[in-house]
Amino acid sequence: MTDLLWDDVECFVDLDVMGALPDVRVPDASVEEWQAVLDLVGEKGWKHQYSEGELVLPVPRAEDVLSRPPDAECPALRVWPTDDVLAIFRFHTDQEVDFDLDLRELQGQDRLDVFCGFLREIGRRLGKSVLMDPEGDHGHPVLGYDAEADRVVVLAKSPVR
């Protein structure tokens, strides 16, 4: 199922416009929703790796990783929905599920379809919208999974080049 056509959204995955690592987020989240995402990763069988600094560990429960001491290193969960697309989840706060994607991996219709499918899976599991902001421009989503429409949609006007 194709939510977006490459020709219609190519400008939104342009490295010069978005930065290499746009921010993808589910606002107003909870520890339970973080856990639902961790469960989804396991259920889907997506290749993944959890690490704290250089130490690779089994994926903990969300409540454990989100209750770490304030001075602890921020853990990362790397998830590959396909071999050539990587999402890196960061456990900054229990109030927002957030992750980065490398736009260099999302070039072309096939990879855009993988990205849309990944957002759809997360959004459906949580029953919430999943938003993509330009790198460092939090709060100005350009693309995202719209929970009401049950599809990934364009949320901003085409950027001026």
Image (spheres, helix red, strand yellow):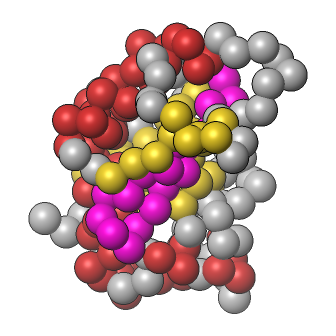
Q: Position of residue 60 (x, y in %)?
A: 47, 22
Which residue sits at x=64%, y=40%? Answer: 55
Report if residue 161 lies within the magenta region.
no
Residue drawn at x 61%, y 18% as measured from the top left? 66
Q: Quadrant of residue 52?
A: top right
Name the chief secondary structure element in magenta: strand
Q: Quadrant of the N terminus?
A: bottom left
| Horizontal side, residue 63 vs residue 83: left or right | right
Residue 70 position within the rendered picture, expressed as x and y whole percent measured from the top left:
82, 17
| Residue at x-position 62% and y-position 60% | 22
* Quarter of the rendering occupied by the C terminus: bottom right
Question: Is the residue 138 above or below the residue 64 in the image?
Answer: below
Instruction: Give the extent of the magenta segment.
Output: 77-93
Count of residue discs? 0
Residue drawn at x 79%, y 24% as measured from the top left:
72
Q: Is residue 152 visible?
A: no
Up/down of 38 relative to 31, above or below = below
